[in-house]
Amino acid sequence: MFSQQVITQLSNGLKQLLENCDPVDAALIATVDGHMVTMEQRGNYLLERLATMGCSIMSLGDTITSELKMGICNNIISENELGIIIFMHINDDVVLVSLTTQKNALGMLLTHSKKCAQDLKTLVN
């Protein structure tokens, strides 16, 4: 779907996300059909399955907001006992998933992930 040059640029965008936002432990980009495009992480997470699950969650969010006539689903936030995961569209074909194990970092994670998604949108369009 993407050239190796674009994948490298996307990966660099994820690296920049991790550099600019200390709480981010991992981030990945996946296609809406669940295929991993690229990922970056500080820890040792099994992110391949998260690519598939993230796309399913975004699809469900899109369906819910469509049914309720609430516009486009921008992102889904999963606050958990041991951290936070944010799923968001980069465009109609690609999803950004970012996660942190810091429970008090929701604002930072959301702000930096939105900025990253906006920056990466130009690469995937």
Image: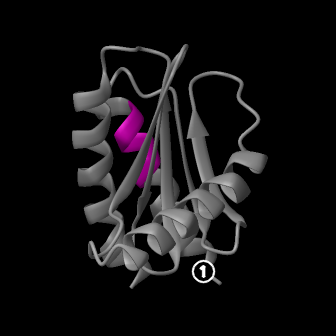
> Circle 1: is it few (<14), some (14-19), or many (20+) Cα within 10 Å?
few
Judged left or right of residue 4, residue 83 is left
Q: Please state the horizontal and vertical placement of residue 74, each as a whole percent of the image.
A: 32, 63
In the image, which residues are magenta? 13-18
Image: 18 above or below 121: above
- The answer to which quarter of the image holds residue 70 is bottom left
Q: Identify the residue under disc 1.
A: 2
Residue beneath the point at 72% across and 67% down = 35
Question: Which image quarter holds the N terminus?
Answer: bottom right
Residue placed farthest to the front in the image? 68
Q: Please state the horizontal and vertical placement of residue 63, each as a whole percent of the image.
A: 50, 74
Judged left or right of residue 113, residue 3 is right
Residue beneath the point at 61% across and 48% down = 39
Camera-side residue of 50 and 44: 50
Image: 117 above or below 45: below
Residue beneath the point at 56% across and 69% down = 59
Specify the amino acid type for callout 1. Answer: Phe
Camera-side residue of 123 and 62: 62
Q: Please state the horizontal and vertical placement of residue 60, each as a whole percent of the image.
A: 56, 65
**Main secondary-structure element of the magenta-colored stretch:** helix
Residue beneath the point at 50% across and 17% down = 101
Q: Is residue 64 magenta?
A: no
Camera-side residue of 16 and 116: 116
Q: Is residue 14 magenta?
A: yes
Question: Which image quarter holds the C terminus?
Answer: bottom left
- The answer to which quarter of the image holds residue 38 is bottom right
